[in-house]
Amino acid sequence: MATIPKQTIQTLFVGGGTPTALSMHQLEYLLKAIQNQFKITKEFSFEANPDELTREKVQLLKDYGVNRISMGVQTFEPRLLEILGRTHRTEDIYRSVDDARAVGIPSISLDLMYHLPTQTMNEFGDSLNRSIEMDIDHISSYGLILEPKTQFYNMYRQGKLKLPNQDIGAEMYEYLMHRLVETPFQQYELSNFAKKGHDSIHNQVYWKNDYYYGFGAGASGYVDGERYTNVNPVNHHIKHIKHNERPLLHASRPTLKEQMEEEMFLGLRMNQGVNKDRFYKRYHQTPNDVFGQTIPKYVEKGLLIEDGQNIALTNRGRVIGNEVFEAFLIGD
């Protein structure tokens, strides 16, 4: 059988279902498969649960070239971890970070959540402050979104789950931005903050509207003008593979108008915003040619700022970013 040459790629992110749930044997099998298929030149990132990330697993990841670990911490508050159904404890967070640092993982990121059921501002502030005090390099923080068909969504519909009101969620986000600006963690995207040199290279592919492959059950990709999503769950995905079929749930090719809309609402997520020259090189039109009414309107509202090079959200615009994004989607 002919040997398939390795494909050189810049970044690879392994996540969605938390791969550290695998046994040592399974994890090494996966890492070997990746090593045999790809040469990764910049960032090799793994998602992890703190209670599953043993010293041995961290060493295995390091041995196979993983240089970034993203831990799903969510909160340091035991009461909220229980509400979320998380299996780790607060002490697992500290131990797993210590293990990752001791083994020599170059970049460590923590995921935090706010606007959780019954969460107070003090509880979110405590989790954020604990993260700042740890020896980590990156913080991602997202508000809880109720997705249809999830346990939280069903509990909310049944009246068994009470979320803090939207005003508290906005206050938590504003606190997040103002607290971290005082630290070495600098905001570079709506929900992401990094020490110098630790911005996620992989995630910027999404925000810059570049192409990327998606492998595995439920994964999404964007290649050669086609956006696609693979079938889920895993057993359905495997069934397609065994029959030599592409495990495709759906695919579409965004129109030129849709591509330009995506360029705006994805690019505006980044602090640097949408680069005008880059936009023109891609679409042979300027952002103002396409969105000539929307841009000045939201500049006047104090939600956008425009200079000679970029169009970006203001601090106030970041708090209500969805309102701005929708304006570009509907051509307001």
Image: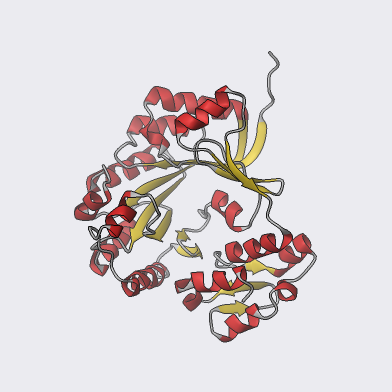
- The x, y position of residue 62, in whole percent, is 46, 34
Q: Residue furthest bottom?
A: 300
204 with respect to 122 (left or right): right
- Give the left or right position of residue 164, taking residue 107 as reference: left
**Residue 42 showing in the rendered view:** no
Q: Is residue 246 above or below residue 81?
A: above
Image quadrant in which you'd find residue 184: bottom left
Q: Is residue 198 visible?
A: yes
Q: Position of residue 166 (x, y in %)?
A: 35, 71
Residue at 43% in and 28% down: 27
Residue with the most extreme front position: 158
Q: Position of residue 165 (x, y in %)?
A: 30, 71
Q: Nearer the viewer, residue 95 or 329?
A: 329
Where's the C terminus, which quadrant?
A: bottom right
Residue at 37% x, 58% y: name it: 146
Q: Residue at the far right: name it.
A: 284
- Determine whether 294 is above or below 104 in the image: below
Q: Is residue 318 above or below residue 151?
A: below
The one nearer the camera, 45 or 283, is 283
- Tell me the residue at 64%/56% (across/down): 209
In the displayed orientation, state which residue is furthest to the top. Answer: 1
Residue 311, by quadrant, is bottom right
Q: Quadrant of the N terminus?
A: top right
